[in-house]
């Protein structure tokens, strides 16, 4: 298995918790968003506390701090865009792209603007796929949208569906063009009848009309759905709880976002 953690750490120094997460999950890749700690300092602690094998893949490292334990995974950056970073990702015999995303925030951008961002993001990913001649893509990050927001599931947006069955045919045709389907497993984690928290962020202000939101998500290109083993919303970092007494993200001791853990199988034939 290949294990990838994504966490928006809300501009806090959560290095101790990040190291605990890495130990508890045996993570191969750690992606931190809004990390105020210099990446070199984070790397030093990961090497000292978790494994000396951790390294920082080649990149510009502005918005995302990436740490990798296995050099065979590569993780070198091939594209840096507006709130995005696209990396090579080699898992077993599979060559793919990992597209990291930090969407426009809800406070300063209305739903139409965020939908427009999603459509631009879709165009950007298609451009990089063609440029790199790679079909397989994993899209990961803080989208600042819920799975049901229009930008997430419009054909010309991210075209992300709620079930594996929905993406089986591969593409959807819209206005004479074909758009690749993505599977969004985060649908299955929404609400209080799921095993775990109802989302990754809790907010009852006018920016969070649903209470819980699933802003942190992973989208799986239809061609690698059979490699996708699972995704979990994490509420603890080893022995350290990162949720409060109500089961919500504890922004006092950790972040206002829960991290997510994505697991991919390596033993899948091409």
Image (spheres, rainbow, N blue to C red):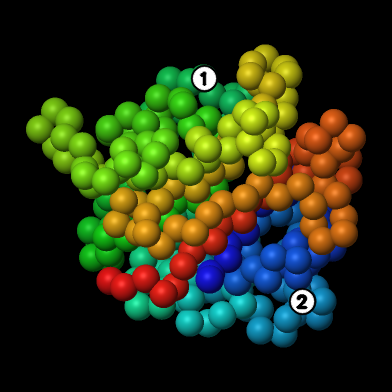
Circle 2: element type: loop
| Image quadrant assignment for residue 107 | top right
* Label 2: few (<14), some (14–19) or many (≥20) C-alpha neighbours in 10 Å: many
- Where residue 259 appears, as percent x and y from the top left, is 68, 49
Left or right, residue 143 beside residue 192? left
One can see residue 61 in this view = no
Mark 1 near mark 2, Cβ–Cβ under 8 Å?
no
Q: How many marks?
A: 2
Q: Which residue is situated farthest in the bottom direction here?
A: 52
The correct choice, above or below, for 123 with respect to 81 in the image is above
- Frontmost residue, 59 versus 234: 234
Q: Which residue lies at the image location 53% right of the left edge and 54% below the top edge? A: 230
Q: Which mark is residue 110?
A: 1
The correct choice, above or below, for 41 with respect to 201 in the image is below
Left or right, residue 28 beside residue 225? right
Q: Which residue is situated farthest in the left direction here?
A: 176
Q: CA distance from mark 1 to mark 2?
A: 41 Å
Left or right, residue 133 beside residue 229? left
Q: Which mark is residue 257?
A: none
Q: Which residue lies at the image location 45% right of the left edge and 58% below the top edge? A: 228
The correct choice, above or below, for 173 with respect to 123 in the image is above
* Label 1: few (<14), some (14–19) or many (≥20) C-alpha neighbours in 10 Å: few
- Where residue 215 appears, as percent x and y from the top left, is 58, 36
Q: Which residue is mark 2?
A: 50
Q: Which residue lies at the image location 66% right of the left edge and 78% below the top edge? A: 54
């Amino acid at each position: 298995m290949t294990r990838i953690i994504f966490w928006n750490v809300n501009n806090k120094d959560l290095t101790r918790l990040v190291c605990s997460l890495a130990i508890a999950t045996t993570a191969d890749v750690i992606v931190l968003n809004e990390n105020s700690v210099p990446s070199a300092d984070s790397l030093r602690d990961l090497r000292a506390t978790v494994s000396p094998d951790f390294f920082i893949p080649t990149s510009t490292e502005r918005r995302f701090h990436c740490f990798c334990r296995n050099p065979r995974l590569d993780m070198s950056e091939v594209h840096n865009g507006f709130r995005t970073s696209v990396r090579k990702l080699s898992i077993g015999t599979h060559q793919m792209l990992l597209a990291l995303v930090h969407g426009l925030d809800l406070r300063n951008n209305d739903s139409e603007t965020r939908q427009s961002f999603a459509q631009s993001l879709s165009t950007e990913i298609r451009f990089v796929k063609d440029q790199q001649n790679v079909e397989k893509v994993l899209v990961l990050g803080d989208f600042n949208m819920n799975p049901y927001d229009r930008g997430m599931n419009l054909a010309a947006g991210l075209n992300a569906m709620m079930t594996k069955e929905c993406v089986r045919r591969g593409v959807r045709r819209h206005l004479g063009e074909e758009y690749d389907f993505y599977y969004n497993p985060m649908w299955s984690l929404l609400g209080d009848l799921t095993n775990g928290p109802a989302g990754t962020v809790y907010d009852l202000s006018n920016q969070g009309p649903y209470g819980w939101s699933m802003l942190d998500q992973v989208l799986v290109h239809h061609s690698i759905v059979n490699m996708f083993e699972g995704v979990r919303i994490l509420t603890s970092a080893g022995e350290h709880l990162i949720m409060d007494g109500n089961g919500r993200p504890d922004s006092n001791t950790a972040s206002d976002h829960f991290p997510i853990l994505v697991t991919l199988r390596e033993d899948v034939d091409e």
